[in-house]
Amino acid sequence: MTMKSKSNKDLIEDIEYGLDLRYISKKEQESEAVSLLEARLERIKNLSKDQIIRAKLMQLKLQMEAYVKEPMYDDQNHFSDFLKVYVDTIYSSRSKFAQDINITPIRLSQVINNHRDPKEEFIMKLMIHSEKVYKNVCDFQKRTWYQVYFHEKVCDTMANQEKWRGRLEKEVKLSEALV
């Protein structure tokens, strides 16, 4: 049996889906992918609630760290999206989280739904809460919530220059020429 040469794209796709590179036909690969998915689902069924929460928290941490490393110039609300996942992973109701960090459920709802920016005190409480939650999960940097929040603000400002730049540019002058 001779193996045909695969392109880099095909190899990357195989690695991405965890497929055995010995298979030549697409049918064999699809069959292997189905088997792998079934095995993963079976393993997930046997995980405890705590294991699932730990995995979700680790995934959230990695997503947040990846977000602050990349210049994503969009106007999505990453801070509130990450906050939703964080709260919904740990708590059965958002009001319990609000109670635990001593804010009103209304204030939490306003931050999560982007009706209000979080106050500095809110982010500080979130930082302390996260330290306690992640203590037995994995290493979580204290500054992560701040980094996500301010990274979003910078990216949002850059993504929306067409909305503010023209108006403000008219107000900015250079009275002395620089060489």
Image (tube, rainbow, N blue to C red):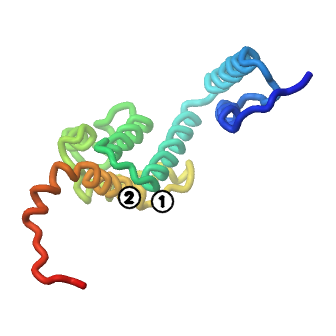
Q: Say the numbered circle drawn on residue 113.
A: none
Image quarter (top left, top right, bottom left or bottom right) of the N terminus: top right
Residue in the image at 44% along x and 53% along y = 70
Count of numbered circles in the view = 2
Q: Label 1: how many residues lie within 10 Å, few (<14), some (14-19) or many (20+)?
A: some
Asked if disc 2 and disc 1 are in contact, CB closer than 8 Å, the reply is yes
- Residue that extends furthest to the left in the rendered view of this protein: 171
Closer to the camera in the image, 159 or 3: 3
Determine which quarter of the picture holds residue 157: bottom left
Q: Is residue 172 above or below residue 80?
A: below
Determine which quarter of the picture holds residue 173: bottom left
According to the picture, the residue beneath numbered tag 1 turns out to be 141
Whole-angstrom CA distance, mark 2 to mark 1, is 10 Å
Q: Position of residue 73 (x, y in %)?
A: 34, 49
Residue in the image at 23% along x and 49% along y = 160
Q: Position of residue 55 (x, y in %)?
A: 56, 39
Residue type at mark 2: give it. Answer: Gln
Q: Position of residue 123 (x, y in %)?
A: 31, 55
According to the picture, the residue beneath numbered tag 2 turns out to be 147
Left or right: where 116 falls relative to 49: left
Closer to the camera in the image, 114 or 134: 114
Residue type at mark 1: give it. Answer: Gln
Q: Is residue 70 above or below residue 58?
A: below
Assign a secondary structure to mark 1. loop
Q: Label 2: how many residues lie within 10 Å, few (<14), some (14-19) or many (20+)?
A: some
* Label whose residue precedes the other's in the sequence (2 or 1): 1
Residue in the image at 11% along x and 69% along y = 172
Q: Nearer the viewer, mark 2 or mark 1?
A: 2
Residue in the image at 73% along x and 21% along y = 29
Assign a secondary structure to mark 2. helix
Left or right: where 53 falls relative to 114: right
Q: Position of residue 178 (x, y in %)?
A: 21, 83
